[in-house]
Image: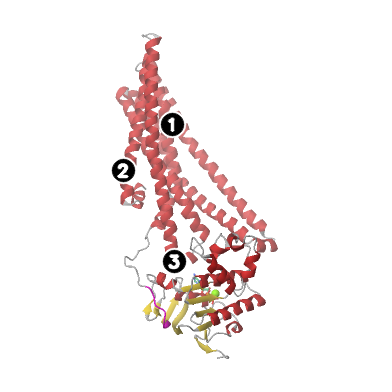
Amino acid sequence: MIKEIIQLLSEGQRKRGVWVVFSVLLRAILDFVGVAALIPIFLVVIKQDDGRGPMLALCGAVLLFVLLKNALVASLARVQSRYQLEIYREFSRRMFANYYHRGLLFLKGKSSVRLGHEVNYVCYMFSSCVLAPVFRMAGEAVLVLLMVTALVVWESFAGFLLCASFLPLAALYVGLVRKRLRRYGMEELEARRKQSRTVVEAYRGYAELEIACAFHTSLASFNQGLEFIVRNRLRMEVYQLFPSFLSEVAIVVGLALLIGSGSGDLGLVSGVFAVAAFRLIPAVRSVLNSWVTLQNASHTITVVEKGISNEPQQDGQSEASFSFKQGIELRNLSFAFPDGHVLFNDLNLNIHCGERIGIRGASGSGKSTLFNLMLGFFPPTSGRILIDGRELTSANRNEWHKLVGYVPQEIFIIEGTLADNIALGQPQADRTKVVQVLEQVQLREWADELPQGLDTPLGEYGSRLSGGQKQRIGIARALYKEAEVLFFDEATSALDNKTEQGINHALETLSLQHRELTLIVIAHRGSSLAFCDRIFDLDVCDIVYNSKV
Ligand code: ADP
Ligand code: MG
């Protein structure tokens, strides 16, 4: 497991890790010296030869030493904590970016709640329940080793007895619970994921759950999850109590064996035994508990490994920008999903610059997927997409996107103001331009009536917007960006007839106002495409000329 963890670390992290290990060992040695410092006091107290004055002076000296030692230990502990948190920060950041860069096909195939859980929770767990226990175990194990060695050297019989009474118990414990702990950990992580999903689903699907009177099923599933997590936690608590039982039993058994054997200065040896036990029991408990935590969280290593691997290859050379004077050409384009579902086979289509082209087809015929291909989100299985004769690839698609406006079926609204949403990705919106584009999509009056105008927050996921308003905001976004090509995917289900007509009217006006704009419009109904020059019908995979043209 240690090897797996080391493999996750970068060169620099490994180097700093060595320092942390060093600081952990130093702490163990300091702790050992701290315990050893108590022994002179103990010996003096037992002998009672000197007066109380020197004894108090000795106590004072030891106290000073202990204070200094603990200050040093505290600063060393900080080195370790900082290292762990730095790893958390680095892994979480990398996983977040990695998942994003794996692209749309990856993200569509995964639950976003699950990915969010991994980026936030699992990375933190890796730092606090894998790295931290490893360091703690290393430190405390060294401390135990030092103390037992000292005991063996100083009073070998007592030391051996202690080992003999403890080691078999510890081995038995480790052997018995190891597999179980790992399984519990995995089950708990799964349960927590499911809990997050249940919550998000219930809140998002409020209306439908309410109408179907189905909230009780969500609640039941949530309760079941809670029940499971609580039961799991309780079980874990019990397992974590065992180590302290074990070490206490071992000490008492060791003492009994010592008395039974009848050798050595009993008073002295048992006193030393007690001093050692004062730190030995917590240390052993800590080693075993850390081990329990580590076993329980061991599967996070796999998740982190998968999440931070294959850092996106940043192509060194910056791609040249695209020109868009001629058009888009789909040449022998084929596409199949990773699950083997073939959608397009040898598709050919030319879209000319400045053209208004409609895309029609039954639901599920692949209209949205065709957009994802033309936007470079999905790689073609075979065939090519050419922009002014230059092939679109995942490496140069960012340059293509600079010319493109995209209004998807479901508009993504960020949790921000109206202005922020229109100038998406720009920290400072150009307010005059925002007003201008709002005018063009006929949202100006609506915006003026909003309580804070352009600065009105739109609510989570645009919860305060209607479907039609969202679509218009999507178009306004493309206009604000001064896109040369507009991809418009009609939200067939979200819009009523009147709103749909309104949107179509807006698009039509847009196409008249901006003759240079290339419009590629997906629509369910042929009537929505009346203003288009040509229509591509996906059901027959061919151009159907508009009756009006
Ligand atoms: P349209 O927009 O025309 O309604 P889509 O392009 O959204 O259709 O989907 C086309 C087909 O591809 C549908 O049959 C859908 O079930 C399928 N599909 C969509 N996403 C995936 C995916 N990630 N894996 C496999 N099949 C998919
Ligand atoms: Mg679609």
Q: Identify the image quadrant of residue 498.
A: bottom right
Q: Name the image colouring.
A: secondary structure
What's the CA distance linking mark 3 and mark 1?
49 Å
What's the CA distance linking mark 2 and mark 3?
36 Å
* Labels 1 and 2: the sequence-earlier one: 2
- The residue to which callout 1 is attached is 282
- Quadrant location of the C terminus in the rendered image: bottom right
Within 10 Å of disc 2 (Cα), the crowding (few <14, some 14-19, many 20+) is few
Locate residue 208, reporting x and y percent.
66, 64
Q: Looking at the picture, does residue 472 appear above or below residue 188?
A: below
Label 1 vs label 2, nearer the camera: 2
**Quadrant for ligand 2?**
bottom right
* Labels 3 and 1: the sequence-earlier one: 3
Relative side of 261 to 461, left or right: left
Q: Are marks 1 and 2 in contact (CB under 8 Å)?
A: no
- The residue to which callout 3 is attached is 103
Q: In the rendered structure, find residue 14 and report the number of the disc placed on it.
A: none
Q: Residue at x 65, y 75 (%)?
A: 499
* Labels 2 and 3: the sequence-earlier one: 2
Label 3 vs label 1, nearer the camera: 3
Q: Amino acid at mark 3?
A: Gly
Q: Nearer the viewer, residue 380 or 176?
A: 380
Q: In the rendered structure, find residue 18 and report the number of the disc placed on it.
A: 2
Q: Which residues are magenta?
A: 321-327
SS class, disc 2: helix
